[in-house]
Image (cartoon, helix red, strand yellow):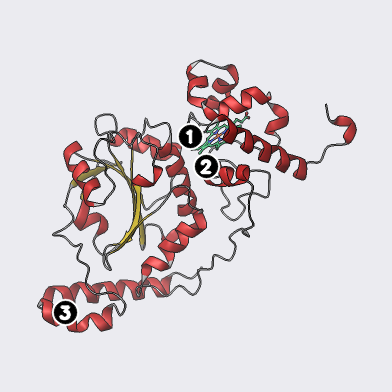
Amino acid sequence: MTLHTPRSRALGMHLILVLVTFLLASQVLHAHDGVLAPTESATPWGGDYFPNTLLTNQDGRQVRFFDDLIKGKVVVINFIFTTCSDSCPLETARLRQVQQLLGPRVGQDIFFYSISIDPLSDTPEVLKAYAQRFKVGPGWQFLTGEFEAVTELRKKLGLFIEGVDNGRNKDHNLSLIVGNQGTGRWMKASPFENPWILADQLANTLQNWKQPSVEENYADAPEIRPPSNGEELFRTRCASCHSLGPQDGQGIGMRNIGPDLIGVTRLRDPAWLNRWIREPDRMLAEKDPIALELFQRFDRIPMPNLRLDERSAQSIVEFLQEETDRQQPLQAAQVP
Ligand code: HEC
C-alpha cells in the first residue's frame, strides 16, 4: 500500500482549508466551496453545534471532543462501558476487524473513539486494560469524562434515548456513528454490519474530496450468497469474534477473540451448546467447568449474552454443524 502521496496531499489540502477558514470571511469562503469541497457545502455541525467536552483517554491524556477528536476528521464514535456483557464486546470486536482492514490509515486519516458512559468504573486504567484485552491497534482512543457531559455528547450525536440507561437496551444500533466532521456527513452504523462495508464507508465514501483511493481495493470481500437464517445470525452476531475453519477470516488475517468454532458441535453436548449460545454469562456465573476453563484460556474476555432465543440458537448450531460437515466430512462409520 503506498500511502505517502495521498496522505501528504490530504495534509496539504487540510492546511489550505484551515488557512482559508482563518483568513476569509464566511461569504468569501462560500465562493471557494466549489474548489475545496465540490459536492458538499460547509457543514452546519461545527464547533457551535458539538460541545468541546473535556475527556481523558486511556493514557490519562486530556483532550477536547471537538478540537482534538473530530474537527476536520473522519471518525468512528461509539459509546461503551467495560462491564457491559452484551452489545459492547460485539461492537468492540467488530470495530477491531474494521480497524484491521483499514490498516495504517487508522490514526492517519481515520480515527476511532470509544467513549465510556460509565465514568465511575471506567477509569483510564480500566479502559487501557480493556483496549489491551481486545488487542486494539493505534489510532483508537478509549475515553472517559463527566457523566453529564458525556450524556450531552450522546444527545448531540443522536445516540441517546431517554429512559434507556447504561446502554442496556435491545437496539444495538444506538451506539455507533461514523462521520466526516468537515463535510457534515454522519451515518449511524450497526455493529452487525459486514466489516468490509464499514471499512469501505470510512476509507472511501466518507473521505469525499480528501483522498482519492485508487489503491484501496476491497475486492477481497467474501462473495455474497443468500445465507440461511443460522448463517445470517452467525455472520452478524458471532463472526466478529469467531472464525469457522482455517480459511475463514483470512482477509482480516488476525487472531480471533474467541475460539474457532469448526467442530464445536462434535465437541460439546447439544444442550450445553444451545444454552451456552443463549446465556454464557449465567453459565460462567454458575461456574460451569467448561465455561470457566474457556474464560481463562481466552484472556478473560467473556462471551457476550446476545439475547438470542432457543430457536435462533438452534439455527446457529445447525449452521455450525453443516459447516463442520462440509469442511471436515466424517467417514460414515465414525458418525456416532
Ligand atoms: C465479543 C466476542 C464474542 C462474540 C460476539 C461471540 N462470542 Fe462466542 N466466545 C467468545 C469468547 C471470548 C469465548 C471463550 C469463552 C469465554 O472466554 O467466555 C467464546 C466461546 C464460545 C463457544 C464455546 C466454544 C467451545 O469450545 O465450547 C461457542 C460455542 C461460542 N462462543 C459460540 C458463539 C456464537 C454462536 C456466537 C454468536 C451468537 C458468539 N459465540 C458470539 C467471544 C464471543
* Residue 228 or residue 44, whichever sits in front: 228
Q: Residues within 10 Å of mark 1 (few under 14, many from 20)?
A: some
Image spot of residue 7 (x, y percent): 38, 70
The residue indicated by pointer 1 is: 306
Q: Which mark is residue 29?
A: 3
12 sits to left or right of 335:
left
Q: In 3D space, how far apart are the residues under numbered discs 1 and 2 (Cα atoms)?
A: 8 Å
* Residue 169 or residue 290, whichever sits in front: 169
The residue indicated by pointer 2 is: 237
Q: Is residue 62 visible?
A: no
Answer with mark 1 or mark 3, whichever residue precedes in sequence. Answer: 3
- Mark 2 secondary-structure assignment: helix
Image spot of residue 118 (x, y percent): 27, 33
Q: Residues within 10 Å of mark 2 (few under 14, many from 20)?
A: many
Q: Is residue 203 above or below residue 170?
A: below
| Residue lying at 54% horizontally and 68% vertically, measured from the top left | 217
Say what amino acid the circle numbered 1 marks: Leu
Please identify the quarter of the rendering in which residue 164 is found: top left
Q: Is residue 33 visible?
A: yes
Q: Residue furthest left?
A: 25
Answer with mark 2 or mark 3, whichever residue precedes in sequence. Answer: 3
**Are circles 1 and 2 on residues that touch, CB within 8 Å?**
yes
Q: Is residue 5 above or below residue 51?
A: below
